[in-house]
Structure formats: structure tokens, C-alpha cells
Amino acid sequence: MAEQRGLVEEVKHRAGKYGGFTFGGQQPDGVSVHHPLCRGTVFPGGAKAAVLLTFDVEGTYGNAEGDVKKELSNFPKICSFLARSGIPATFNVIGQMAEELGPDFLHSMIDAGCEVASHGYVHDLNKLYGGDRVYAGHYGLDENTALVMEGVAALDKIIRPGGVRGIRFPYGHFNEYSYNAVERSGLSWTSNVGIDDFVVPGQGYGPQPFQMKLGEKIYPIVEIPLDSQTFDWPIWIADENTNGVFVDAVKRYCDDRGIPFVRTPKGAVAVWKTRIAEAVANNSVLTLLCHPIYLTIRNAAWGDPVEEFLFPVIEILADLSRQNSAWVCTCSQMAEFYRELC
């Protein structure tokens, strides 16, 4: 069995010239920002900021931990709460997982007014090809095309042809073959690049959607950066031994802003509330990331993470949306807005 990889490691692509890993303050080779959305852009409803709530739905198909049965039983509750709150989210789903669970799984998300997007057909590519090469960026065009096309096809077969408009690569690891595959598939957006200014200040990507430039090629795909520091990590899964960079980043963020560094669901609400408030104050875009599998982990220090963490965050977003302080949208809605404006 291949060694399980931590999310923070000095790993680069093994195929192609450009790309790699952006989390943990790492700079992929030959990657640059083209035509970012301007700060202070006025969004629908007159909002000066935009917030996107996204979920990577992968169960334990990757290296995640948690109770898959509990995760599946949480989805109806989450979708119902989103619908009642009027908050759309983007669910990035593993294609193989969707096939195995059947159509009701995806339709519950669609019926709640949310978007279903791809998270690849499988999460770890070595499960298809063997060896220890886990990431999309470790492979060439054929393997990346299969990951994109088969993942999208599995979801489209359940939703409708052309229903999937975007993809987030597992681990956010990519190369030019990954983006060539997305371009070939006709998808409109990706969301792979981490906002890592808390680890390496001024890394340069920023939070604003942009078009990815790999080497000299500009891709006609909207890249929607995500917050890779203050997502699941301040709550329960961060481990100082294997993910110390993330733990240090969140602690530094909390210390800088006077937030108690409390690694519980309620402590994480304080972090996310501050992150959202800063995005609104800065007239910016913030893409939040949550892994539902981690909402199943129990501890004597907390009760149900869905109730104590996720629902309060959704309520915060609902309040901002009602006040037109922030446009809460899906990734496809953001991509369409970007294209109309730019």
C-alpha cells in the first residue's frame, strides 16, 4: 500500500513543465495570474464582496478520516438547512462515490439550490494506476483527461448532460496537462489555488478570481482561489506532527486578530466569522472550504460539528446575503459573473 501523504510537503509535479502544489505557501513552477477580478467590484444586489461556500465530498476515498455513514446521514440535514437559509453552495463530488451512492445523493444537493461540480473520478490516482503517484500533477495528458472526463461524465449521467460546469482537483495539485484536460472538456471554472498569504505573506495569488497562465499559455478558464488555511484545520483534524504548517498558520491568524485559538467547532466559527468579516470589509472575494467527512469526528470537547460549526456559519452568510453586504454564490455563478464583467 502506498504511503499516505500529508497535505503539506515539498512535492512538485512529476510530469510536464508547469504546475505543482499551492498549499502551505508553495509556489508552483511557471504559474502566474492573468486578469484578476478587481477589488471593489459591485456584485449582484449591490454587494461589494462575495463569499462562496464549497464542500469537497470525498468520504474516505482519499486520505480523509471520519465516519462515512455519519457523513452520508448529514447531507440531508445540511442541504435542508442551506435551502431554508437561501444559501447556495458548491459540492465538489468524487465521481466514483456518486456512482456508488445513486442519484438521490446528488439530487438532494440540486434540489436545495446548490451546484454539483467534479472532484475527479477518483481522489488518489495511484488507486487507478498503482505506485505512489497520487496527484494529478504527477501524470500526463491521458491520465488527466481521464480524471476530468470520467469524473464529469459520472456526475452528468445523474444530473443531466452538461450539468457540471467546474472541477476542483484533489489536493489542488495540477500541471499544464490538468488544465489542458479541463479546457478540452469545456468546463468553465476550476478552484485549485490556495490563498496562502498567512503562511507566506504576499505569495501573489490573492483571493480574486482570475485566469490561469501556465508558462506562456493563458487558459480560458476562471480560477477561483480558495482559503487553504482557515478551513477545516482550526477545528479538529490539524495535527502538529504531520500538518504543523497549517496549525501554525491558523494560530498566527488567531493571535494577530485576538481570536482565542480554540480547536473546537465553536472556536472555528470565530475564525470563519472573522475571515468573512474581513472579506466584506476589504470588498473582496472569499471561497470557504469544508470537508463534510470531518464534520463526523466526535470528541468529548464538542457535540455535533454540523450543529456547532456549519449551521452557525450558514446563518452568518444568510444574514450578510439578506443585508446585501455580500453576494453568496456558487462557483458557476461567480464564473459567469467574471465572464460577463471581464
Image: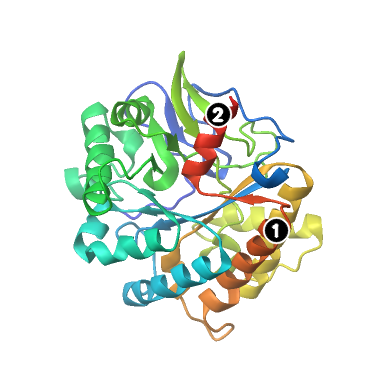
The answer to whether residue 286 is seen in the rendering is yes
Q: Residue furthest front?
A: 45
Can you tell which quarter of the image residue 16 is in?
top left
At label 2, counting other C-alpha atoms closer than 10 Å, the crowd grade (few under 14, some 14-19, many 20 or more) is few
Q: Is residue 131 left or right of residue 290?
A: left
The answer to whether residue 130 is seen in the rendering is no
> Is 281 above or below relative to 64?
above
At label 1, counting other C-alpha atoms closer than 10 Å, the crowd grade (few under 14, some 14-19, many 20 or more) is many
Q: Nearer the viewer, mark 1 or mark 2?
A: 2
For badge 1, the amino acid type reads: Leu
For badge 2, the amino acid type reads: Glu
Residue displayed at 75% across by 69% down? 260
Report helix, strand or loop for mark 1: helix
**Residue 320 numbered tag:** 1
Where is residue 290? Give x, y as percent: 50, 59
> Is 203 above or below relative to 169?
above
Where is residue 168? Give x, y as percent: 41, 44
**Residue 340 numbered tag:** 2
Which image quarter holds the N terminus? bottom left
- CB atoms of marks 1 and 2 within 8 Å: no
Q: Is residue 229 left or right of residue 274?
A: left
